[in-house]
Image (spheres, helix red, strand yellow):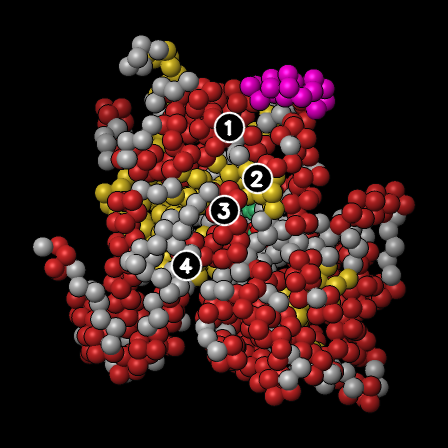
Amino acid sequence: NWKKHMLPEKNDTDSIEQDIVHHTITTLCRGVYNIDKLAMYQATAHSVRDRLLEDWNCTQEALHKENPKRCYYMSMEFLIGRALDNALNCLKVKKNYKESVNNLGFSLEDLLVEEKDAALGNGGLGRLAACYMDSTATLDYPTWGYGLRYQYGIFKQIIKDGYQNEMPDYWLNFDNPWEFPRTDIRYEVRFHGYVATKMNEKGESRMSWEGGDKVQAMAYDVPIPGFDTKGCGNIRLWSSKPLNTFDFDSFNAGDYERSVSEQTNAQNLTSVLYPNDNHLVGKELRLKQEYFFVSASLQDIIHRFKRAKCPWKDFPDKVAVQMNDTHPTLAVPELQRILVDVEGLEWDDAWDIVTRTFAFTNHTVLPEALECWSVPMMEKILPRHMQIIYDINLFFLQKVERDFSPDRELLKRISIIEETSPQQVRMAYLAVVGSHTVNGVAALHSDLIRKNLFNDFVKYYGPEKFINITNGITPRRWLYQSNPALRDLITKTLGSEDWATHLDLLQGLKKYADDAAFQDAWADVKLQNKKRLADWIKTNMNITVNPHALFDIQVKRIHEYKRQFMNILSVIYRYKSLKKMSAEDLEQQVPRVVIFGGKAAPGYYIAKLVIKLINSAADVINNDVSIKDMLKVVFIPDYNVSLAEIIVPASDISQHISTAGTEASGTSNMKFVLNGGLILGTVDGANIEICEQIGKENIFMFGVLADAVDDIRHNQKYHGLFIDASLQVVIDAIQGGEFGDPSVFGPLINTLTYGGDYYLISTDFKSYLQEHTVVDDTFRDRAVWNKKSIMCTAGMGFFSSDRAVRTYAEKIWKLKPFKVGV
Ligand code: 26W
């Protein structure tokens, strides 16, 4: 009888209208007399979710029956953004929804912006996870994401007097149609306690983790629609809840308040996303979040594995786990603990299963971003895991000594435990030892981790364990959805939409790159997108910018290594130069709008000063009529995924100017180029491969190479640094008070001068200015520029996250697509 009632939702406009009205009345308890845009968005979203759920159930049921190998993508961050537009596109129902919503007296575009971003991530790593979930769903890979359901996503950035202020992002205030609470899926997670010895069922002596405090993890499922497939993926997010058991000790002592406050503590565990990007702070609560996440996810994975009654040795044939950076690395000792202590396996058999299950992606080489946890803290919170980590390390070092080299210096270097005071657990090393494959995220980055960070491991394990998988982005969100004008032009030119799932087909645009009519159509799309952004800036910031000017954009987390500081210094240099020009010369200049956006970690003082300098400079420059609108500076507040969807399609130039060797890959570089924006960048991260794919004549590159950086730093330290005259002009202007109280910027300027200029701004500044001149000169010839822009988009096929995910599936997960509904 079930089947009889499982009728598919109909997608004609009349049925859609009926469903929306139905949800307005039943789900929202509202009527036509009190429905506003937000309520209408909610009713619409609920009707779309109904359609998604059919696919979700279909997929999960088929997976349950067939039980193929699955992959679990473990990530502390998923920076998803909005869901409605994406779901409409994936289900191919947007056109009809537009009409239905219209018939009900609203505009779909108005409703889409009512949705709050799901901002459960900091930056690149979290957004990458979201793109990969889009691709695994689209390609029908049986993959689930596991993460945490933070109640506060990344903070909301407010700019006050030019400074960044942070406001909490309590994003779950209204009902969230895109998550399903699974009240029946709950696991207990333990902290603290002690280790005892116990007999297991077979009469063997085993360690057992006892006592301590327990909290509960409850599951929330976020369906991830695939594009043009019946298959639907899932991200399972864990939320901490108090255990419903009675704390008799507190009760006996009559301490009711304490038992309630402990319940609150338990709930607080998943309250907030730590807002640090590429910087470890080492807080106890963060360590607890990491273990909570890992423990709940593994219990869930094991529960699913056990349903099929396979022997434990088959676990790696049914389960692949990808660790998104070191944040989930406690999964390694946790699985070992479960197998040995709870399931009674022998250590070596368990370790074999563990190391055939896990793989690890490294996303950064910055020393301050590498996770190290103090042994005493770990001992207190996870006493059994600390023992297991010591044992993993002991057996590993014994093997290295026996099979490879007795060199004590090497053993010290390669040890998972760092012999500082107190001792530290190097999580990246634990992740390497516990995984079968380790990958970097761009060719240069993978080379660098093989040469530096993991060099001893490469020598011991051999090079095959360390591979490269260059990052990718989903063309669905980052072109199809965010740039409808370009989407339609491309589809019309190529004759179908197939490029959206086979991005290499963009190559087909190359033959039109010299076609004047096509160039005009292409340029017209870019202009429309620049106007859309200019309108946003006017409406939200009351700054007027000329859409015909060159739009020069740098949006990303604010970090010294990303060198937004160098960018604003060059803007000030440009301003000073413009001011010196005669009226005739001024007229000949290429007008520029320089756009910044991005959040600084709340405790990152220098990064926050960079934001202040940008805003102070903007204030002066934008109000100086003498430069005749030849330069405008805009800092867009609260940069997030939804804003990126408006900003990215509007660039002529985007900047990716990290010190060579510091940006592992970058992914916004790919988004801009896919949308026909040119790059001004350093020879770093994925810029290098973008250059290879689109051709070096279509990218503006400058600066020293990664392999020169160490020597330059050394020389600067011992022989002093050289500040070029052009840079000195800018420093003088700031110190002379042209952009407000110079004492404010003292510490920032000091990072250049007295700080030894660690990120080599003084080294690269001159070639950076020169390349800016090349950019200006190129922009003057619109035909030349348009051709480059077309060649950019046409060459970006490689950077689809579909390619990246397929490579993961083939090289690491050994996973096959699993198609449903055919
Ligand atoms: C524990 C503190 C912390 C938090 C986040 C350390 C490190 C991180 C992330 C790994 C930082 C991050 O997002 N890295 C970025 O990952 C992107 C996806 O691979 C790359 O494109 C960026 O270059 C890299 O900075």
Task: Say whether residue 347 is magenta.
Answer: no
* Location of residue 541 (image quadrant): bottom right
Q: Nearer the viewer, mark 4 or mark 3?
A: 3
Helix, strand or loop at label 2? It is strand
In the displayed structure image, the side of residue 149 where residue 249 appears, left or right: left
* Location of residue 497 (image quadrant): bottom left
From the image, tell me which residue sits under label 4.
138
Sort mark 4 into few (<14), some (14-19) or many (20+) by Cα contacts within 10 Å: many
Disc nearer the start of the sequence (3/2) = 2
Task: Give whichever of 12, 145 is nearer the camera.
Answer: 12
From the image, tell me which residue sits under label 3.
810
Total labels: the figure holds 4
Residue range highlighted in magenta:
394-410
Amino acid type of disc 2?
Answer: Val
Instruction: Return the x and y of residue 418 as percentages of the image width and height.
Output: 63, 26
Q: Nearer the viewer, mark 4 or mark 1?
A: 4
From the image, tell me which residue sits under label 2.
438
Helix, strand or loop at label 3? It is helix
Task: Give whichever of 529, 502 is nearer the camera.
Answer: 502
Q: Kindly indicate whether the residue at mark 3 contacts the one at mark 4 (C-beta within 8 angstroms).
A: no
* Image: 81 above or below 719: below
Disc 2 under 8 Å from ligand 1? The reply is: no
Q: Kindly indicate whether the residue at mark 1 contacts the one at mark 2 (C-beta within 8 angstroms).
A: no
Residue 377, labelled with which disc? 1
In the displayed structure image, the side of residue 433 where residue 205 appears, left or right: left
Task: Name the residue rendered at 25%, 78% in the picture.
Answer: 13
Helix, strand or loop at label 1? It is helix
